[in-house]
Amino acid sequence: MEYRQLGRSGLRVSTITLGTMGFGGTGWASAVGKIDVEGARRQIGLARDAGVNLIDTADVYSNGLSEEIVGQALGRDREDVLLATKVRMPMGEGPNDAGLSRHHIIRAAEASLRRLGTDHIDLYQVHEWDGQTPLEETLSALDALVQAGKVRYIGASNYAAWHLMKALGTSEHTGLSRFVSQQIYYSLQARDAETELVPVSIDQGLGILVWSPLAGGLLSGKYRRGVDAPAGSRHLSEWDEPPVHDEDKLYATIEVLVDIGAARGVSAAQIALAYIVGKPAVTSVIVGARTEDQLTDNLASAELALTDNEVSRLDEVSAQPLLYPYWHQAKTSADRLSPADLSLLGRHIG
Ligand SMILES: NC(=O)c1ccc[n+]([C@@H]2O[C@H](COP(=O)([O-])OP(=O)(O)OC[C@H]3O[C@@H](n4cnc5c(N)ncnc54)[C@H](OP(=O)(O)O)[C@@H]3O)[C@@H](O)[C@H]2O)c1
């Protein structure tokens, strides 16, 4: 297992993180998995044996049950791993039971600590943007948790690039703790993140933790044109994340994944994970698994390095058009581009 520095922090995390959205499995999360404490203990054991040192959860997963299960499954081993959790989504019906106000952040952090059975959260992430709470308030609440020793590092998730820049600017001029990472959706099914979220990470030194690197299983090789996926698979339920805008391109991408995997004797899932881990600014992919076989398969991707030719085939089949102003920049600003700009425009300027 490789360990990478999380953004500009001193923390080293494994290139594979264990996701726990399927721990518990109540409400909307029941489509993801129904993993109980014993199952969680086995998944955590498999992940740790492979060298995984980061576990990602959120208060909202099964309304707190995922955090509880992580805490119980870890027990005394808690200090052997890094725990990441999140705040922002509704945890009740009240007007202050959601969002990134000081009120909600402090209460939610205390509740997460209780459920996780720990005295600190290694990475506390804001789960989504809150455009109605001043960033000074959000960041000062997060900073207070850091100063109190209850949180070690802070990260964002699902922010737009301008949200991130506004937050980083606020931290800079107030001296409050700065986000070290962003947790984002990025996969061969949709490489939208390459437009702004990857460049901002390169420019600002933010680590990237990738959620749903298999697009919720779509890239695992079991969804193919004209083939029925196994019963019980997430995408046969009402699950609608990520949205699929171009089914033809998705199926074409899956065929390339299956082909490369077959030539190497490994699964399409492993190829899809290795592709994303190899991309600039990516620190770790957060893998979710409904079964232990899936987890074992995904963990094996840590040993894979794709060839340039394999990466080019996947780049090509999953390519997306340049949005404005980037198509214009590709034509007219090639003489003055930074490494962050080039991560998007490099292949368009010859
Ligand atoms: N920050 C956020 O907003 C956000 C959002 C979503 C997720 N997350 C985090 O990211 C983690 C991972 O998300 P995810 O579960 O959507 O990730 P994913 O890796 O894209 O999808 C995992 C699902 O794909 C299928 N699968 C996985 N490995 C497979 C394999 N080797 N062969 C065949 N099928 C396989 C399984 O579903 P089936 O068996 O049902 O097909 C599994 O539950 C979550 O646990 C959570 O920690 C964060």
Image: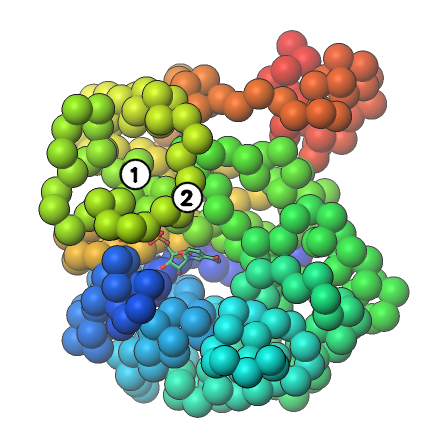
Quadrant of residue 213 within the rendered picture: top left
User: Can you identify the residue that label 2 sits on?
Assistant: 242
Above or below for 259 versus 62: above
Residue reaching furthest to the top: 350
The image shows residue 265, relative to residue 205, as above or below, that is: above
User: Type of residue at label 1?
Assistant: Leu
Return the residue nearer the eye: 102 or 268.
Answer: 102
Q: Is residue 57 left or right of residue 203?
A: left
Q: Residues within 10 Å of mark 2 (few under 14, many from 20)?
A: some
- Horizontal side, residue 221 vs residue 70: left or right: left
Can residue 269 be seen at all in this image of the molecule? no
Quadrant including the C terminus: top right
Left/right placement of residue 306 relative to residue 73 reads: right
Q: Residue at x 63, y 30 (%)?
A: 343
Return the residue at label 1.
Answer: 218
Q: Position of residue 329 (x, y in %)?
A: 76, 21
Report how far apart the C-alphas of labels 2 and 1 lie in the structure.
Answer: 9 Å
- The chosen color scheme is rainbow
Q: In the figure, residue 50 lies in which quadrant?
A: bottom left
